[in-house]
Image (cartoon, rainbow, N blue to C red):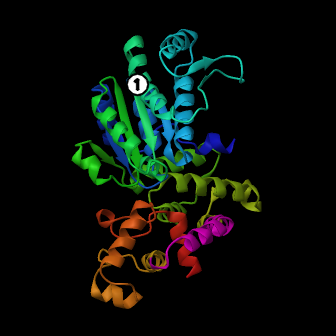
Amino acid sequence: MMKIFFTPQGLIGREAELKQVCQLLQEDRDCAVTGIPGIGRRRLLRTAAKQVGSRSLEIDCLRCHSARQFLRLLADSLIDVFSDPAELAKIQQWSQGQPLTLDRIQSPKVRLIWPTLAGKEWALFQGLLALPQQMAEWLGCRVVVMFYNFPHIRSWDRQGKWETYLRQEIQLQSRVSYALISTVAEPWVYASQLPVIHLAPLTDAELQPWLMNSFARAGLKFDSESQAVKLFLSYVQGHIKDAITLAQRLWLNHQATEKSTSGILYADQVHSSMLSLVQDIGVTFEALLLLLPLTQARLLESLALDPTHSPQSTAYIKKHQLSRGGGLQGALNSLEQKGLIYGPRFGYRIALPLLDFWLKQRL
């Protein structure tokens, strides 16, 4: 029931970005969508693909630690998308010229399988990567392949052979659009002239209607005299995933209190829900800090307490006893790439609202 109340029925804001992505997909062009985790990158692409009638494959490179895992994920995604009997017949016909077969017996669902012999991975990769184009031509449809965490491919593709070939295919395939989802766009993306759609935090004006409507569906409303809505929006800072998480916790906490009969949400309930939420996930944040290099952890704490547009300034470095020069710039770049802080475009501040609140409470 809670999911029904707070799962967005469609995109929140993002009208301009949606129009841009739809146009690119209709023209069979490729793109990169950037922004911090939880800001709505996947929902944007899924909505755009649905609007233009594209078949969509989703490949999360973070789940792949070897070439074999990458191939398995790619093959399974293809079968999930092209699962009608007529489409599977096309794949079976295609597979006769490939080092793999379509298995309908060995597993609970249909799968593409191949021999476990070493040395076959490269031929499999070339074949599987060509299959979306083949299916698009046979079926007269559009296909979009979404790669999440694309740079992670380098964790096992040490020589860059697979990444280089994949980049070439992105440029060459005419009926398949590739969408690379990442926190920041890498230099090669700009050098390849791929359009980059960057998702900024939502404004309060964009987020508030969803917030009010969601709680109205749950039979609740915010107290108009206690600044409850304003406090909620200040906590989530335009981050849709954290907004959904806090809304769910607020609803649960309200159901468990004696105030639940009133149907009114007060500012103190918003605050206590935020406190209980970050207390529950505090262990995760502690582990995150421990995994960061000391320079990055110290910089993250400094930006939580003292956001600034100029962390490289002498005064800021001296005030927070930060390292100077390349070490500081490297820490800033790394934290931005990890999606933990915003870069200069939005001022150097913590990007994840729950982490930001937890750091402030901790410090």
Label 1 sits on a secondary structure element that is: helix
| Residue at 50% from the left image edge and 61% from the top image edge | 236
359 relative to 280, above or below: below
Packing grade of label 1 (10 A; few <14, some 14-19, many >=20) is some
**Residue 145 falls in image quadrant:** top left
Q: Is residue 358 visible?
A: no
Name the main secondary structure of what is drawn in magenta: helix
| Quadrant (top left, top right, bottom left, bottom right) of the C terminus | bottom right
Q: Position of residue 356 (x, y in %)?
A: 51, 70
Q: Is residue 265 magenta?
A: no
Is 131 situated left or right of 344 in this image? right
| Residue at 43% from the left image edge and 37% from the top image edge | 146
Residue type, numbered disc 1: Ala
Q: Position of residue 23 (x, y in %)?
A: 28, 31
Q: Which residue is tagged 1?
A: 130
**Residue 107 falls in image quadrant:** top right
246 relative to 274, above or below: above
The residues colored magenta run 274-295
Is 175 situated left or right of 267 in this image? left
Q: Looking at the image, which is closer to me, 323 or 69?
A: 69
Q: Position of residue 76 (x, y in %)?
A: 57, 29
